[in-house]
């Protein structure tokens, strides 16, 4: 009887090891596929959709941890969940880029004209013998230095946009717009209705 039980246990162990090793290869392949899909979009995903990228990375690390512990079934299931999420990052990145490009167009449209209008007003006031009522020399000097900052930041925003750093470009162009509106108000200029939105 003992010999028979020992044989059954031995057969059970062999079957268990075979089952484990049979899921090891698919788990390894699934992890590699998920990792490859994530690596293909990782840099841009972390830049444009960092929360989603971080979630994929966390899930991928969990799959690797399960694999390292020898829990190949859990590793396989985790990796199978990660793969479509990793592949979906490319679409999420493209959607975010489209959104930022559209935002760039909305915010940057007309900014060069605003900056030029401010420059023209500053030039006229610089040549004038007396500043208009409500505008003292300190405010005027602040507006002049603000104009220099505007020009610099707008140039940086354009550079960021040209190099594909859309998030930075949009952030900078928003700063330019807000600062331009403040300067126009300080100089007593009429702010165009479309520029306020």
Image (tube, helix red, strand yellow):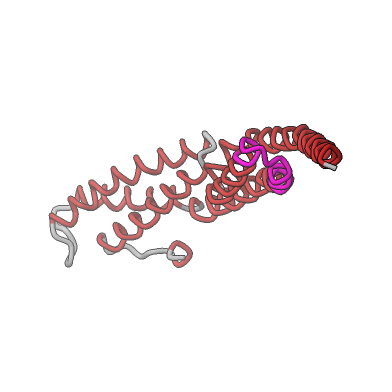
Residue 79, placed above or below residue 174: above
Magenta stretch encompasses residue 68: yes
Compare residues 150 and 37 and report the one nearer the observer. Answer: 37
Secondary structure, magenta segment, majority class: helix
**Where residue 20 sits in the image (x, y, percent)?**
76, 37
Residue 134 occupies quadrant: bottom left
**Where residue 6 sits in the image (x, y, percent)?**
80, 38
Q: Which residue corresponds to the image point at 46% horizontal and 36% vertical from the top-left?
A: 159
Left or right, residue 26 beside residue 122: right
Compare residues 173 and 57 and report the one nearer the observer. Answer: 57
* Highlighted magenta segment, given as a residue range: 65-82
Left or right, residue 39 beside residue 186: right
Q: Which residue corresponds to the image point at 66% horizontal and 35% vertical from the top-left?
A: 35
Residue 120, placed above or below residue 9: below
Residue 83 occupies quadrant: top right
Magenta stretch encompasses residue 144: no
Q: Which residue corresponds to the image point at 73% horizontal and 44% vertical from the top-left?
A: 73
Q: Quadrant of the N terminus?
A: top right
Compare residues 38 and 125 and report the one nearer the observer. Answer: 38
**Where residue 146 sits in the image (x, y, percent)?**
26, 49
**Where residue 60 sits in the image (x, y, percent)?**
62, 42
Q: Residue furthest front?
A: 1
Compare residues 75 and 30 and report the one nearer the observer. Answer: 75
């Amino acid at each position: 009887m003992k010999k028979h039980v020992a044989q059954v246990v031995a057969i059970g162990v062999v079957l268990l090891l075979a089952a484990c090793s049979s899921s090891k290869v698919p788990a390894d392949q699934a992890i590699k596929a998920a990792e490859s899909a994530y690596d293909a979009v990782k840099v841009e995903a972390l830049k444009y959709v960092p929360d989603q990228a971080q979630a994929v990375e966390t899930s991928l690390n969990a799959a690797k941890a399960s694999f390292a512990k020898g829990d190949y079934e859990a590793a396989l299931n985790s990796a199978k969940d990660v793969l479509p999420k990793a592949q979906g990052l490319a679409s999420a990145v493209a959607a975010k880029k489209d959104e930022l490009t559209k935002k760039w167009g909305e915010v940057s449209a007309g900014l060069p004209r605003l900056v030029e209008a401010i420059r023209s007003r500053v030039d006229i006031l610089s040549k004038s013998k007396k500043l208009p009522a409500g505008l003292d020399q300190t405010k005027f000097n602040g507006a002049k230095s603000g104009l220099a900052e505007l020009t610099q930041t707008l140039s940086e925003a354009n550079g960021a946009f040209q190099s594909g750093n859309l998030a930075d470009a949009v952030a900078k162009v928003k700063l330019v717009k807000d600062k331009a509106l403040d300067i126009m108000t300080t100089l007593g200029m009429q702010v165009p209705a479309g520029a306020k939105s």
